[in-house]
Image (cartoon, rainbow, N blue to C red):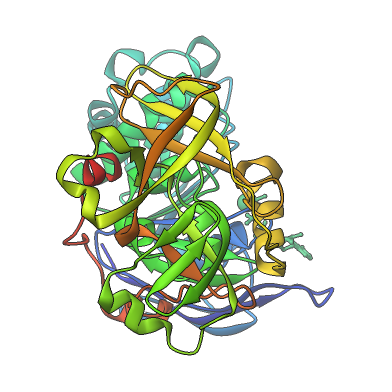
């Protein structure tokens, strides 16, 4: 067991490309931290530096109190699980799992004991004498985890371990990984670009973009208090809706109408009067106005012409467009759309598309004009130039990390908050 500290870790590849830039992060003993971000942002590079598979260009890496920059991978007491978990096809599950210990010269009785213990944790006991070819994808993935577990390392590093599995198995294994990590209590850093995994698996999530750490916090901290446009748009599905906004005195003018932000939030907007900002509203912060009840005073109502309704039984998504005279000219927003993958970031202002998640009891109809409501206490405003969230009082990555998160006291599942 150990704490892992990244102190301004930088990786510059021989061709001069900086894949990781001054990354600072402390993973507490026993903590499960998720490293998430778009393809190419430096997740694997960061993980490989921790494992010792990649030289560290600058900065310090500590495991416990010891600086390990120059230690060989095998001396770091870390086990890595990769996306391609390539098991030895000619060996039984038992031998696959015990192989590292055998190489290390551990005696047979000890190997058997460790393998059987891991098999019990992973629910693989009845498969120990089978060959990998005769196992399901999920079982093979568990064998790969078993190989890491038997080594009883100070930490696990996992690089997209579930991405080879089909969707259903992935969901199942996601729960397994979480359960196993909790049982073992081993410090774990888990890389993914799947934001559902990011939100559900770990104690804390570290969001990266272009080699830079953007924000570190509990899933709910990131969800409710994103520090910038990138984190706001990357975390959450369907993604946050973005639209142009201007502050005029006490109110914020949006294409859907005027909203009045809570006083303490409004107080943070000094100097933005008249500037075009970017407003962000999550789909679940809209509601069918007729179903809002007592919460009505917290927001504003507006007419919307519903174009598409998607009912998933437990959820109802209403799509509508809003007209706006303003255009948001934001490099940040364009990059976000590219990073997250084109169509997934609704951007009012260009086409003015908005997605609202409504109570399934809503009786709004396609083609009709409906009265919707937006929760003004949940509207975020971003600076279009640097993407900074102007409405949050959360602190930057260093401060958040230094404060060591754990769970957000405000944590509550997003849908429940508005209902
Ligand atoms: N050996 C190398 N030389 C130069 N650049 C490299 C090298 N290896 C990786 N890179 C670059 O470093 C950046 C980060 O790569 P990395 O593999 O860490 O990304 P990632 O976040 O793991 O992405 P993915 O989600 O696609 O796995 C990429 O832009 C990549 O092209
Ligand atoms: Mg990678």
Q: Residue at x 72, y 68 (%)?
A: 331
Tally the marks: 0
Which image quarter has ligand 1? bottom right
Asked whether residue 394 appears in the rendered view, the answer is: no
User: x and y percent of residue 159 in the render?
Assistant: 53, 48
In the image, residue 3 above or below residue 415: below
Quadrant in the picture for the N terminus:
bottom left
In the image, residue 32 above or below residue 4: above
Q: Nearer the viewer, residue 40 or 399?
A: 399
Q: Nearer the viewer, residue 315 or 49?
A: 315
Q: Residue at x 52, y 75 (%)?
A: 388
Toward the top, the furthest residue is 134
Q: Residue at x 45, y 29 (%)?
A: 317
In the image, residue 418 above or below residue 126: below
- Asked which quadrant contains residue 225, the reply is bottom left
Asked whether residue 71 appears in the rendered view, the answer is: yes
Q: Residue at x 60, y 65 (%)?
A: 209
User: x and y percent of residue 179 in the render?
Assistant: 25, 37
User: x and y percent of residue 366 in the render?
Assistant: 52, 20
Specify whether 321 is left or right of 176.
right
Specify whether 400 is left or right of 275.
left
User: x and y percent of residue 256 in the render?
Assistant: 50, 51
- Asked which quadrant contains residue 200, the reply is top left
């Amino acid at each position: 067991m150990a704490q892992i500290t990244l102190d301004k870790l930088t990786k510059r590849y021989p061709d001069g490309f900086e894949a990781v830039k001054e990354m600072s992060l402390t993973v507490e003993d026993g903590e499960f931290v998720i490293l998430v971000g778009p393809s190419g942002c430096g997740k694997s590079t960061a993980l490989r530096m921790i494992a010792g598979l990649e030289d560290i260009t600058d900065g310090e890496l500590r495991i416990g109190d010891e600086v390990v920059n120059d230690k060989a991978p095998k001396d770091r007491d870390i086990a890595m699980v990769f996306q391609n978990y390539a098991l030895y096809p000619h060996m039984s599950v038992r031998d696959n799992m015990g192989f590292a210990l055998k190489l290390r010269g551990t005696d047979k009785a000890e190997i058997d004991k460790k393998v059987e213990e891991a098999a019990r944790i992973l629910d693989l006991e009845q498969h120990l004498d089978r060959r990998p070819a005769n196992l399901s994808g999920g079982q093979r993935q568990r064998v790969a985890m078993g190989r890491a577990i038997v080594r009883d390392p100070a930490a696990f590093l996992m690089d997209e371990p579930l991405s080879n599995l089909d969707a259903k198995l992935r969901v199942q294994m996601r729960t397994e990984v979480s359960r196993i990590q909790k049982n073992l209590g081993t410090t774990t850093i888990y890389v993914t670009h799947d934001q559902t995994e990011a939100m559900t698996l770990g104690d804390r999530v570290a969001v990266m973009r272009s080699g830079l750490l953007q924000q570190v916090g509990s899933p709910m901290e990131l969800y409710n208090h994103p520090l910038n446009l990138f984190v706001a748009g990357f975390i959450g599905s369907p993604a946050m809706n973005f639209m142009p906004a201007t502050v005029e005195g006490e109110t914020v003018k949006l294409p859907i109408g005027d909203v009045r932000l809570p006083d303490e939030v409004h107080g943070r907007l000094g100097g933005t009067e008249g500037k075009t900002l970017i407003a962000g509203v999550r789909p679940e912060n809209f509601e069918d106005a007729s179903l809002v009840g007592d919460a009505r005073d917290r927001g504003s109502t507006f007419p919307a012409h519903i174009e598409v309704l998607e009912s998933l039984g437990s959820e109802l998504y209403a799509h509508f467009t809003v007209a706006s005279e303003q255009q948001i000219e934001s490099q940040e927003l364009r990059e976000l759309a590219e990073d997250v993958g084109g169509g997934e970031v609704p951007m009012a202002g260009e086409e003015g598309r908005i997605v609202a998640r409504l109570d399934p009891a809503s009786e709004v109809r396609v083609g009709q004009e409906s009265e919707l409501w937006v929760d003004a206490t949940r509207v975020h405003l971003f600076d279009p130039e640097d993407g900074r969230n102007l409405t949050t009082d959360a602190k930057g990555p260093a401060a958040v990390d230094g404060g060591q998160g754990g769970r957000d006291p405000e944590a509550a599942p997003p849908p429940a908050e508005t209902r």
